[in-house]
Image (cartoon, coloured by chain):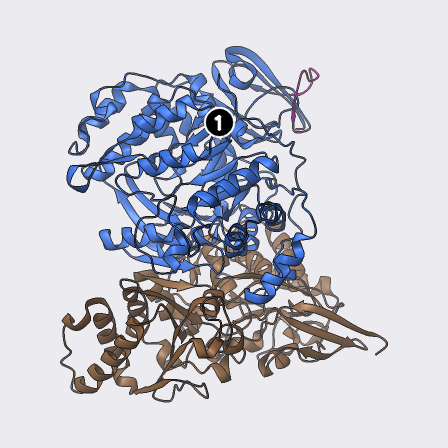
Amino acid sequence: MSQLRIAGGTVYDPANGVDGEVRDVCIDAGRVVNEVPAGATRLDARGMIVMPGGVDIHAHVASGAVNVARRIMPETHDPALAPELVDGSVPRSGVDGTVPSTFTTGYRYAGLGYTTVFDAAVAPLMARQAHGQLDDTPIVDGGFFALLGNDEFLLRQIDAGERERAREYVAWMLGATGAYAIKVVNPGGVELWKRGARERTDLDTPLGSSRVTPRAILDTLVEAAVTLALPHAAHIHCNNLGLPGNASTTLATMQTLDGRRAHFTHLQFHSYGSAAGGGWRSAAREIIEYVNAHASISADVGQVMFGHAATLTADAPVEYLLHRSSGRKWANVDIELETGCGVVPHEYRERAAVAALQWAVGLELFLLARDPWRVVLSTDHPNGGSFMSYPQLIRLLMDRAYRDEQLRRVQPRLLAGSALAEGLDREYTLREVAIVTRAGPARILGLREKGHLGVGADADVTVYASDPDQARMFATPRYVVKSGVVVVEEGQLRRAPAGRRLHVRPPFDAAVTRTIRQHFDDYSTVRFANFPVSGLRDAASPLAPVGSPPEGR
Amino acid sequence: MTGTIVTENGTCLGCGCACDDIDVVVSAGRIAEARNACPLGRAWFGDGNVPLRCVVNARDVMPEEALRVATDRLSRAKRVLVYLAPGLSCEAQRAGTAIADLLGGVVDSATSATALHQTLASQERGFASSTLGEIRNRADVMLLWAVDLDRRYPRFSARYGPDAVGIFVPDGRRSRRVIAVDVGDAATGRVDTDRRFTVAPAAEVATLTALAGLVAHGSRAPTTSAPDGGTVWSVASDLAEILRAGRYVAFVYDAEPDERAARSNGRFDALAAVAQALNDTTRCAAVALRAGGNRSGADAILTAQTGYPMAVDFARGFPRYRPHDGSAFVRLRSREVDAVLVLGDAALIPPGVVEGMTDVASRVVVGPRASEFALGSDAAIDTGVPGIHSAGTALRTDDVPLPLRPCLSGPPSVDAVTAQLVELLAARGRRGVA
């Protein structure tokens, strides 16, 4: 099975300028090649749509927080039977639902044609456990982003004006935890929550010292990502998530980065204006116009989909507020010297005004974004909705009539002045869908061998049977190829090879470890020697650093 | 000290605190000293000497033969219980769960016998918690609720508090206010306290419920009408005042107290309610302490792979959660299990569960001292102890993962033997749906 020809499909490979051309995709030893011999296995893709495997830039699938959600939400689990595999790997049952179990998560992603997934938020202290969960998430290649920006050591370096040491620490941390990128969640705000603060956190709210502010934290971490030439920019979850009027914080955050490369995640949750009397309104237009005009910024949307969700985040104060306002059960775990963790079950109802606004804001961001390479698809799974709802989301983007029909059903109370309510007629093309679901995220992540089908690319390919109902089409790929192995055949999951771990190991000045070790000796409950992970399933990928901003097209 | 080797930063699984600063001194192939370890830790490390037998029906056999018999017994059985006993790495727990899935069996751990209601309460209402380092570094008020740190978690005080020094409590014990509540026989032991309360076991839930009301609503809380309402109210009021004055309150209790308390649902629900409600006015983290052998790991692995932390039944081809009527204890007592696979240290299985294993038709035991299992077995494979003879991962009581460092070599690892069993059983195919 090492040589394969996907023959006669209509190929969408936007990274290589291929827009719906009938051609073959040839694969040898897990890579896309120019040609394979006539005797190679042949997949007949005539009349079908061929795209690179999907790349999820932001989901929660393997962290301590995900496991807390699984544990406290047993009532949301649905049975998931083991697939009938033919490759000799042990097929595993599990649970579906808002927070699926590990093996089922891998199977379901592959079943949707996604072949790369990143967990967007892992506390460094919990990294070892996250790797264990990823080991049990088959098929997909993946990794995680390490939570920084509320960590005591970093805050101390900022306070002391030790920018270089902060950067070396970040480099050490990424390697020690086997992480792929820097994740910043509510910079400073989580530490303030641990200190008992309940107020909003603005960019200049001091943490004890006036030198330590969210602005300084962002500046330090964004700069570190740039200087270390990490493949992915700092992945930023802004302050004040989910609060009315937070768009001003989001804009101020974008502005303070001053043209440096940065990724803003689940932008939808950060694009709310305030109305008279403390109410809510959409500020999607202001936010996306800023993004449109600034090529250094990339974003994923974090679309809300109606139905059950699990809100889980390192942004623990948000979950406390949600628990207080919804009355639903609540888990909180303060994670020593590093970050937080909160979990609250949630339901987005069409007839609930705020949920309807959130839904509309996400769609506005998608539909008003000018550059699909920089504004890509996510639901912040399982926060805005499950990754299993991606096909439905794609249909909302591609089919205005379907979208308008849903718009007529939602609670309109907060939609006055919303661009969506006023009418947006844009419909995404297949090329644009291929960009926001694979080519764009791969480029933003700096994954040069993912998200495209050029020679040398990883042989991750999805083949869809054409269907006028795009939701159905994207939900049931006919074939999925992962690293050259046909994992989905005739719509059935047949093989479940282990995925590769994607992580970075930036070089750092060894002198920094002396200071870090001292910090561990003074305050940590884990020995410095026991902190770094080892023996990852794969060695660090030879990821070429990508220093330049993603180009607009 | 010729011939002496020191393995530094070893992780001890003698209790759930999982101290990872143990320097293990090995001399002449035996553990001579476990530096920094407490009495529980020293007992856990022992001298590192474990039996190395493979036994089938009381006869010593080659490992292949023991594995063959184990595979045979398990694949022929109608109803298999896989028991994840304490003393397993997370890696072995993962493989053990795979076996239950393959065989359409039941998988369970000590949790359903010792921490059932603590787990159920956390599922019903959630929890407000932290990792232990937050207590060390922040807690200025510590409430020890019927937990005997000295006896059950001897190094807790020095490592996490009250004695530990932390960032926001630079003077350690002197920076903190320590309150102990003794509940009947469940006393808090020898800890140095600023204030000590005594609550009758029958009044415990009422006291906690009143306390939850008081911290949530202040003096506007509804009053209790219990017969000893006066005492309950007085203790709860005093406690509420102290707790509300804290900046960061650590509420420490034992998730695995005596069996009587473990059976009380209301107790753990009320404990969690107090901790959550305190966060309305200040910060509070409750930490539930577990005993040793990577028990939290079993919960976390089962949760990740099946969605549920204990008492999982795969009979229908997918995991079903049966905490009330499907725990190992209940299934053994109802005699529906005809084969049990014990993974881990069988000597640490809760007594009620071991008793239930007496009449099971086939017993297969894989783990440290498997050949010495009190009930005997059809097949037993001795392994080393994870953390002494083999590497791997274990979770502290607060789910913080730690590496296990072997200080002795020789015995096969329980991870490797369990993985072999998975392969052998998988080769016979997945069990059809019952």
Q: Is residue B418 visible?
A: no
Is residue B343 highlighted in magenta? no
Is the magenta region chiefly helix, strand or loop?
loop
Closer-to-camera residue (B412/A89): B412
Q: What's the colour of chain B in the image?
A: brown
Measured from the top left, where is residue B239 in percent x and y? 28, 78
Is residue B369 depicted above or below A226 in this figure?
below
Measured from the top left, where is residue A370 in percent x and y? 39, 19
Q: Residues within 10 Å of mark 1 (few under 14, many from 20)?
A: many
The residue shown at (66%, 68%) is B9
- Which image quarter: residue A352? top left
Is residue B140 depicted above or below A135 in this figure?
below
- Which image quarter: residue A396? top left
Q: Relative to residue A53, is residue A81 drawn left or right?
A: left
Is residue A37 highlighted in magenta? yes
Q: Which residue is mark 1?
A: A296
Q: Relative to residue A84, is residue B277 drawn left or right?
A: left
Q: Relative to residue A330, is residue A147 drawn left or right?
A: right
Q: What's the colour of chain A in the image?
A: blue
Q: Which residues are magenta?
A: A30-41
